[in-house]
Each structure stands twice: as structure tokens, then as C-alpha cells.
Image (cartoon, rainbow, N blue to C red):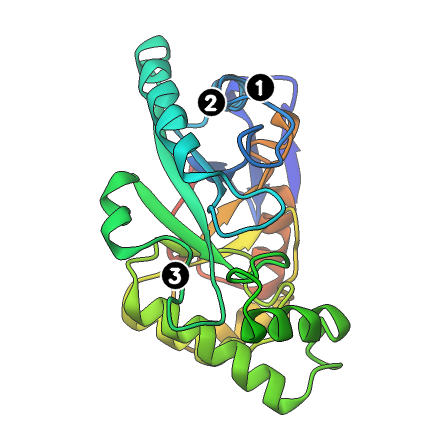
Amino acid sequence: MSITDPADKNKVSVSVNGRKYQLLSDLHTHTVYSHGKGSVDDNIRAAIDLGIQTIGIADHGPGHIGFGVPRKKLAEQKAEIRALRLKYPDIKILFGVEANIIASEAGLDIKPEEFPYFDFVCAGWHYGALDGLSPRGLASTLTNLARSKAEQASPRQIRHNTEVIVFALKNFDIEFLTHPGDKAPVDLLEIAAVCARTGTLIEINTSHMSLTAEDLRMMMLTDARFIVNSDAHTPDRVGDFLPALALIAEAGIDMERVVNLKCMS
């Protein structure tokens, strides 16, 4: 794998096995509305500099105790994004949210009636999304903190985590599942099979890189499709896709199954 002309920021492309690929979108970026370091404007300008066609702003949902965006701030953020669409008409700017998957009957911290408020909803498991410090939510978080890797986890823990995520996938229109297997050990094959049935994309996240080539090859046994995102918390990481592309090449994933990579040659 080699980067072609990295100085030409508007045409950043990467060659894999003699073919060039470009990242078309980065839908998972954070801003100062949650715990990112840059503004919405900063992330948009970073994406424009890279020639990315679509940028998604997906700060953490309101159920995260540490840095979830309060519901009253979501309207402010949406209004800001609407204004920036007028300022930057040559890039598509999407208002999303990274909902928190929670271990309760609610399933997510974004309510079903709130989904139309966003352009898309993605979701993932996070420490700190304790469902109002409920006993079940607190127990899940503490257990996963103590045994965060699949090899450390008990079968019961993996089963519980998997069931919680499957419930969210089946009951909500989630665009993509963020960093699966990170922070909560799960049955990745079962998760991939459910994502295939629900049409939920599986994120290959270059911030966490929790998935291995072996994981991806196993998930490819299903019809699941993938999306590459940076999970950028600083503007300079917007559009970072090289680690994911290397992993995809190692796993031998058919590039047609990665929805936001374009073959340039």
C-alpha cells in the first residue's frame, strides 16, 4: 500500500494492489458540543481540504453522563449546521448523533420519536452511558471496564452484551454500528448477521481499531456491509482512513462491500 502524492490534499488517494481508492465520506466526527476539540466549522473545513464529499457531525447522545450533548443543545447544533450548509454549499453536511446503546428496555438514549430530527443515527457502546445510573446499566459498565477484551470476558458477559446490541439493532433504524467489540466484548458473528438483516453498516473505526483482520473475515461470512470512519475528536483527524484501508486489504474484503470507498482506477 502506498500513498500517491500526499502533498496534493485535494486528491488524497491510496493505492492497494495497483488500484487507487478515495474516501468519499466521513460520517463519524465529534466537536466541542461533546468532547471533541474543534468546532463544527473546523471539521467541515478539514473535510473540504481533503476533497471529501460528505461530512457527518455525530456527537454523543444525551445519555452519556460525561460528555453527551444535552437535548436543549441539539437544537442549537442543528441550527448551526443549517447555517454552515449555506456557507459551504460544495460539501454535503449531515447532522447526526452517536446514540449510546444502553442495557435497559429503552435500548438507546435517543427515543424513537426523535429519530426524524437527525439526518442519521449511529450507535455504539460507551463507558459512562449508564442509563441514569440504573443497577443494570452500572453493572454492565463496571463488568466491561474490568474485562474489556473478549479473551477476558465470561460467556455470560459476552451473551449479555450481544443481546443488548442486537435489541438495539432490531428495534431502531441505526445507520451504522460504531466501533463494534470495543468496550463491550460481543459475539461479532452474530452482530454481523443481525446487521446484514437490518441493513445496518458495520463501522471500521480508525480511532479505535478494535477489529482485527480475522474479525473482518469472520464477519464477511454474512452479507454485512461496512463503512470507514475516523471518529475524529480533533479536526486534523477528519478523513483518516489509511489504517482501515490497510486492515481491509489484509482481511481481503471485497471493496464493493465498503460503502464509502471509491475505486479511482
Q: CB of mark 2 within 8 Å of CB of mark 1?
A: yes
Q: Earlier in the sequence, mark 3 or mark 1?
A: 1
Residue closer to the observer: 114 or 225: 114
Q: Identify the disc placed on residue 225.
A: 3
| Residue 69 higher or lower than 156, as above or below | above
Q: CB of mark 3 within 8 Å of CB of mark 1?
A: no
Q: Which three-letter amino acid code belongs to the residue tagged 3?
A: Arg
How packed mark 1 is, by other alpha carbons closer than 10 Å (few <14, some 14-19, many 20 or more), is: few
What residue appears at the point 40 percent right and 55 percent down from the top-left corner?
Answer: 176
Mark 1 sits on what residue? 9
What residue appears at the point 38 percent right and 39 percent down from the top-left corner?
Answer: 96
Query: Where residue 3 sits in the image (x, y, percent)?
Result: 64, 34
Separation of marks 2 and 1 at Cα, in angstroms: 7 Å
Query: Where residue 256 sits in the image (x, y, percent)?
Result: 38, 55
Q: Which three-letter amino acid code belongs to the residue tagged 1?
A: Lys
Q: Earlier in the sequence, mark 2 or mark 1?
A: 1
Residue closer to the observer: 15 or 78: 78
Separation of marks 3 and 1 at Cα, in angstroms: 28 Å
Mark 2 sits on what residue? 51
How packed mark 2 is, by other alpha carbons closer than 10 Å (few <14, some 14-19, many 20 or more), is: some
The C terminus - image quarter: top left
What residue appears at the point 50 percent right and 55 percent down from the top-left corner?
Answer: 178
The N terminus - image quarter: top right
- Secondary structure at badge 2 equals loop
- Secondary structure at badge 1 equals helix
Query: Would residue 260 be visible to someone looking at this image?
Result: yes
Q: Relative to 124, is 118 on the left or the right?
A: left
Q: Earlier in the sequence, mark 2 or mark 3?
A: 2
Separation of marks 2 and 3 at Cα, in angstroms: 24 Å
